[in-house]
């Protein structure tokens, strides 16, 4: 089965008792046992649930891994990975990771004795140079949020293997429709299923995928022991969203390419970051490892904070909303929204400049998106 067929058909079997083409939601906490010491595959929903199991086998089939484990959020998925490590373990992370991930690392896990080093992983040498005797994990994001930096997964997987270090990738921006990190030798793939995987802004969820049995066992144990599980109803909604993933990612990517090209030519925009643009420093690597470039763009307005505020207050179609990866176009201004609490010096050092805007390009008619941006840009 080819990928686009798998997305629609893999593991979604009609219900054997009724023939319902969409499998039911097993909204149950527990299961009646046939006798002591036996069960029918399920005993308690924190451990396992048929709707969740279906979502997990679907995700594994798409990502090309043996296993998938799902969680109540992307953050609990990252946390579950980190629970495999111990005080004194050192972790190297991409520097431009999702803000919630660096908050988890710096403000929670570091209190438990885990050490973190942030490097610009778009240059693999930076990762190699940061390795210490106690380095246990390399944690990457590609493309990153919000600067859209691209990391060469094959190069980093090679470095990780040489040093027997586990390598994980937060692949939320790409999804298995555009990039399958396991094919490049990456051990762990993580998704915030809140974003493109479910695709409709209806749920919060996360997933961790691997083909390594030992890692999978640990993740399952953490899922059961800590209990950050997604509800059966949320799993059912994710399954529904997932079935149009290939179609959506194609349209997100096409639309984003057109919007990025429009923005790059606009006189009030000084810089556009989109891995699909030949001007993007990671374009060649992205082209090699991804089949398209997804729907995320960031761009810099010449007028700094006032321009950012004016643009966001004047868009009509683009929703002024945090989050990304849903069917509707959403726009944020990190300096006054997601990163408003970060001290200015630190924010600027991280490349989150005053005029930076982040756009999650939806699947609407691209002409409407461009006209909306054009009208709002005129007013700043
Ligand atoms: C949203 C996001 C997360 C966190 O996921 P939640 O589902 O919001 O908990 C992690 N990484 C990336 C890249 C994200 O975009």
Image: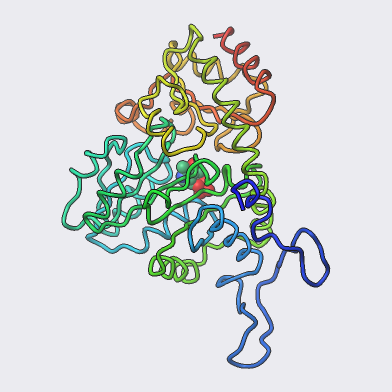
Residue 144 showing in the rendered view: no
Question: Residue 151, how many percent across, how many down?
Answer: 35, 38
Tell me which corner region of the image, top left, top right, bottom left or bottom right, holds residue 327: top right
Say which of 259 and 36 sits in front: 259
Q: Where 289 sits versus 207, above or below? A: above
Tell me which corner region of the image, top left, top right, bottom left or bottom right, holds residue 349: top left
The residue depicted at 18 percent of the width and 43 percent of the height is 129
The residue depicted at 32 percent of the width and 47 percent of the height is 106
Q: Residue furthest front?
A: 1
Q: Residue furthest bottom?
A: 36
Say which of 156 and 92 sits in front: 156
Tell me which corner region of the image, top left, top right, bottom left or bottom right, holds residue 11: bottom right
In this rendering, the count of numbered labels is: 0
Q: Residue furthest left?
A: 133
Coloring scheme of the render? Answer: rainbow
Say which of 21 and 126 sits in front: 21
Question: Residue 281, how many percent across, how many down?
Answer: 35, 25
Question: Residue 71, how many percent across, how many down?
Answer: 53, 59
Residue 270 showing in the rendered view: yes
Work out which quarter of the rendered image holds the C terminus and state it. top right
Question: Residue 93, how many percent across, how many down?
Answer: 31, 45
Say which of 140 and 202 sits in front: 140
Q: Could you tell whether 197 is left or right of 243 in the image?
A: left
The residue depicted at 48 percent of the width and 58 percent of the height is 65
Q: Where 131 sits versus 335, above or below? A: below
Q: Where 76 sits versus 126, above or below? A: below
């Amino acid at each position: 089965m080819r990928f686009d067929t798998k997305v629609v058909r893999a593991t979604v079997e009609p219900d054997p008792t009724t023939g319902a083409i969409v499998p039911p939601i097993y909204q149950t906490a527990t299961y009646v046992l046939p006798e002591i010491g036996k069960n029918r595959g399920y005993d308690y929903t924190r451990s396992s649930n048929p709707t969740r199991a279906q979502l997990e086998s679907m995700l594994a089939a798409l990502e090309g891994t043996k296993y998938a484990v799902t969680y109540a959020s992307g953050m609990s998925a990252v946390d579950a990975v980190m629970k495999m490590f111990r005080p004194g373990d050192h972790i190297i992370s991409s520097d431009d990771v999702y803000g919630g991930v660096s908050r988890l690392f710096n403000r929670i896990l570091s209190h438990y004795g885990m050490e973190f080093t942030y490097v610009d992983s778009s240059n693999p040498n930076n990762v190699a140079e940061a390795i210490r005797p106690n380095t246990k994990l390399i944690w990457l994001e590609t493309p990153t949020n919000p600067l859209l930096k691209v990391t060469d997964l094959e190069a980093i997987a090679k470095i990780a293997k040489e040093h027997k270090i586990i390598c994980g990738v937060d692949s939320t921006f790409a999804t298995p429709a555009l990039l399958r990190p396991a094919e490049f030798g990456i051990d762990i793939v993580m998704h915030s299923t809140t974003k493109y995987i479910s695709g409709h802004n209806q749920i919060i969820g996360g997933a961790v995928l691997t083909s390594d049995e030992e890692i999978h066992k640990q993740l399952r144990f953490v899922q059961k022991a800590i209990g950050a599980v997604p509800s059966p109803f949320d799993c059912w909604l994710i399954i529904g969203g997932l079935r149009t993933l290939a179609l959506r990612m194609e349209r997100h990517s096409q639309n984003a390419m057109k919007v990025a090209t429009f923005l790059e030519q606009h006189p009030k925009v000084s810089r556009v970051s989109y891995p699909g643009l030949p001007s993007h420093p990671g374009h060649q690597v992205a082209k090699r490892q991804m089949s398209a470039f997804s729907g995320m763009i960031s761009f810099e307005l010449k007028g700094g904070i006032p321009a950012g505020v004016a643009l966001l207050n004047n868009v009509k179609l683009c929703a002024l909303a945090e989050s990304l990866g849903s069917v509707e176009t959403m726009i944020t201004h990190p300096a006054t929204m997601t990163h408003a609490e970060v001290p200015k010096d630190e924010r600027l050092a991280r490349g989150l400049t005053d005029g930076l805007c982040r756009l999650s390009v939806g699947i609407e008619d691209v002409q409407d998106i461009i006209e909306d941006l054009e009208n709002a840009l005129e007013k700043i």
